Image: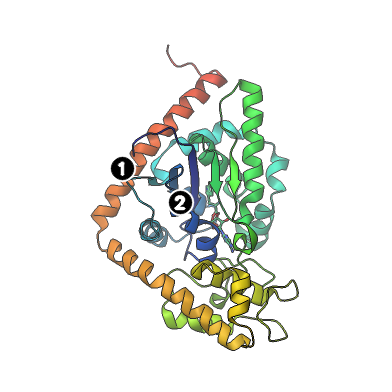
Amino acid sequence: MPETEKKKLFSAVQPSGAVTVGNYIGAIKNFAALQGEYDCIYAVADLHAITVRQEPAALRRNTLELMALFLACGIDPQKCILFVQSHVPAHCELTWVLNTVTYPGELSRMTQFKDKSAKHADNVNMGLMDYPVLMVADILLYQAALVPVGADQKQHLELTRDLAVRFNNRYGETFTVPDAYIPSGSGAKIMSLADPTRKMSKSDENPNAYITMSDDRDTIIRKCKRAVTDSGSEVRVSEEKPGISNLIAIYGAFTGKTAAETEREFEGKGYGDFKIAVGEAVADALAPVQAEKARLLKDKAYLNEIMRQGAENAARLARRTLSKVYRKVGFYRGE
Ligand code: TYM
């Protein structure tokens, strides 16, 4: 990727199972959209993924699949840096230094840490607690000004800003203090189809709670038909209608229609018709992405080459920040 004067942007997704339409709407959809305006750096966050138990063969497979999905969603490796996090050692190296300016209390009160600790009570490991610091390192290494994420990552972005400012105050200007880029409205947090008061999550035990990016047409339509909706029959966004409001958000994300346009389109029609329309819109939009992903997965040599080049370019940028950090904290560099 040629280096330009554009501001840098960083984001990542964990290869920890199927990617959902929540991940897509909250984050990945914006990745390609922002690549003209910023110098974008996108990672497959495999170091993050092992904070909960992964089957090694599945992790390897999911890493390749996520790489292919990024490309199929329009991320252009000529314009962006696309790489696998564990291929760039600077992420772990900066995490160590940042650990020394982080307080345990800041990490133990993170909502995601508390939720995951409750969910994986048999595996509350130090990595799970340190997860946000690794995320801070991911972002600060590239001097990113903007980080596109869903609303669930807001707290981690606040920690990123806090640690950047703290380090800069202690050691002198080193890091860019980044802003989160969270979609406005309900796209920032797509809810479970089985319980619209909870976030749609790839780790939900109930597969009907989420639509994955690789679900086939029939599965998508079936899941939409089964989606838990509210009493009444009017297709309208409302706090009393979290189920229908969530489906309106999903429909809007895949058709480009505003909530008002959707409400007008389905005036006088019931939930049943609307749910089928949502399923069809999602399936229509995902079909070309799925076809492209399948094509790319057949060309492993190409994917490996993209990863290799991406890691090389990412490592070059990361090394620059890491050298600055090592100098600032007083590590003897032999000069
Ligand atoms: P991950 O893999 O859990 O999710 C990837 C992205 O999807 C967003 N997201 C959602 N958005 C809307 N509705 C939902 N239901 C929904 N579920 C997930 C997430 O907010 C995220 O943007 N820690 C990150 C990965 C990461 C990262 C980073 C992100 C590692 N290093 C540095 C930004 C910057 C994560 O767990 O994503």
Neighbour class for label 1 at 10 Å: few (<14), some, many (≥20)?
A: some
Badge number at residue 300:
none
Mark 1 element type: helix
Residue 7 place in picture, x, y as percent? 49, 37
Tell me if 73 is positioned left or right of 297 in this view. right
Residue 88 place in picture, x, y as percent? 41, 39
Which kind of residue does numbered mark 2 sit on? Asp
User: On the image, numbered disc 2 is attached to which residue?
Assistant: 46
Q: Quadrant of the N terminus?
A: top left
Colour treatment of the image = rainbow
Residue lying farthest top? 335
The number of callouts visible is 2
Residue 176 place in picture, x, y as percent? 56, 32
Mark 2 element type: helix
Which kind of residue does numbered mark 1 sit on? Gln
User: On the image, numbered disc 1 is attached to which residue?
Assistant: 309
Q: Assign ligand 1 to one image quadrant.
A: bottom right
Tell me if 12 is positioned left or right of 81 in this view. right
Residue 74: quarter of image = bottom left
> For the point 45% across and 17% down, which residue is it?
333
> For the point 49% across and 42% down, which residue is it?
9
Residue 157 place in picture, x, y as percent? 62, 45
- Work out whether 196 lies above or below 229: above
> Could one spot residue 195 in this view of the protein?
no
> Could one spot residue 122 in this view of the protein?
yes
> For the point 36% across and 61% down, which residue is it?
72
Q: Quadrant of the C terminus?
A: top left
Q: Determine the CA span between mark 1 and mark 2.
A: 18 Å
Q: Nearer the viewer, residue 262 or 191?
A: 262
Residue 121: quarter of image = bottom right
- Work out whether 84 lies above or below 122: above
